Amino acid sequence: MAILKKSRILIQSSSKMGLNQKKAFNALLYIAKQQMDEDFDRKIFKSTYKEVKSLMTDKRINNNELLKNLESLVEIGITINILENEKFMSRRAVAVLAEVETDKDFNIEFIFPDTVRKNLYHPKMFSPLNLDFQKGMSRKHSLPIYEFCKDYIKVQIPKMELETFKFMLGITGAYNKIHDLRRKVIEPAIKEINETTDINITKYELIRNGKKMGHIKFWGEAKEGFSVSEGNGIFPGNEVEIFEEEPKGKIKIQKTLEFEELIKKMPAKEKLTLKQEKELKKLIKEYGLEHVESNLNYTNSHKYKEYYNYLRKAIKEDYAEPMRVKAAAEKERLEKEKLELDKQKAAAELKAKLREETLKFYNNMPEKERLDIEKTALEELEQLKGIKFLKNRPTIFASMKEEKIIEILSSIHQNGYNKKGLKSEATD
């Protein structure tokens, strides 16, 4: 039995991962966490095809299929903390995996980006996920909905903006007809979750904002015989803090502070009556703080006869939606740029580490073998144009010789198989 203590910011995330990619990601998170428990500073994690597959499913998976899923995780980005809970960090986009390497013996080495790795060890909030339950899932959208609801099953599952919900499932721009969203995504996922996991989603509701659906809310409960805090009734929940529950007083204070900060953004000459304050608080509860704040900013930038009446209408009809869409697009563009820079940085770091390890291996080789490789390197360099000129530049020539030695050793190490792939179609 494998219990993954998955950080809330990784649960509240969005990516283009398919179901098997999501299962593989969870499996790698679990494996890495086990190894970090032994060595907190560990950055390169090791596993095997057999171990990863055993955490994903009870069905047979072709090795080449698993390899494609693992390698694709390097190319796929994940946006974490999409509900932007500032208790953790701002919303952030990173790669799912920084690097992955396999060999002909079906061994795997992988590296997570620092942001993901840091949220593996003692995350501020997490949900205990029994990976046995993901094995029974066959629908792509079941797993993220299950993880989100399971995270809050002991308390009230929060209402979520419908566009954020679709973003979490990786279906932004799709299923725009509510009937299709219900019939093809939400209801089949709920049915599978209720049949295969430790929770029941008892109800869901799509909440209308004006003329369109604006939010979605789920209700759920732990199944009889399963402990919410223990995951499956065996996990020693009393040894760890499963998730933090904010004291009611603290929540009230936080909401009061948020409301006061919102009021400060109104023009100084505008004063709300007690009745208007009460109504505005209800609007925040119904539409969400981000929705109300964006429409308040919209109102501030436009002419109006009566400020509050204009603000109320803006909130209900969502005048600020185009502004939020534009801001979200710009944010996504910046996140993609950062993701690409992070990937380049991770690749450069791995290349430097491999270079260091290769040179260390070379320096520890028997002298005869080392001299043979050096001789081969010099012979290949002799074939280059302008080499006589470069020989008169000792520093440059020494660097070229070193790189050629690394190239030769890498070629020997590959020994007929691709560093990231296998020619065989065999399965374990």
Image (cartoon, rainbow, N blue to C red):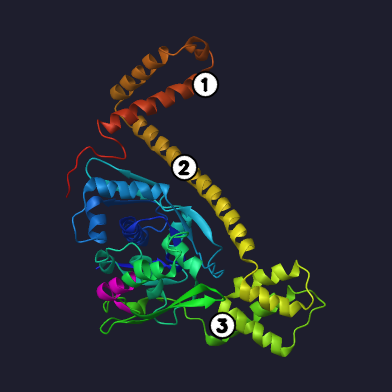
Q: Nearer the viewer, residue 390 or 317?
A: 317
> Picture quarter containing residue 332?
bottom right
Q: Nearer the viewer, residue 86 or 306?
A: 306
Residue 336 visible here: yes
Q: CA distance from mark 1 to mark 2?
A: 23 Å
Q: Earlier in the sequence, mark 1 or mark 2?
A: 2
Do the numbered discs 1 and 3 sit on residues whose CB atoms are within 8 Å? no
253 in relation to 396, above or below = below
Q: Circle 2 is placed at which residue position?
A: 349
Compared across the picture, whether 389 is left or right of 139 comes to: right
Q: Earlier in the sequence, mark 1 or mark 3?
A: 3
Q: Nearer the viewer, mark 3 or mark 2?
A: 3
Q: Circle 1 is placed at which residue position?
A: 396
**Residue in the picture at 25% in, 72% down:** 196
Q: Which amino acid lies under the numbered mark 1 shown in the image of this protein?
A: Ile
Q: Earlier in the sequence, mark 3 or mark 2?
A: 3
Q: CA distance from mark 1 to mark 3?
A: 64 Å
Q: Nearer the viewer, residue 329 or 259?
A: 329
**Residue in the picture at 70% in, 86% down:** 276
Question: In the rendered picture of this protein, how many numbered marks are placed on residues?
Answer: 3
Q: Circle 3 is placed at which residue position?
A: 251
Q: Nearer the viewer, mark 1 or mark 3?
A: 3
Q: Nearer the viewer, mark 1 or mark 2?
A: 2
Q: Which amino acid lies under the numbered mark 3 shown in the image of this protein?
A: Ile
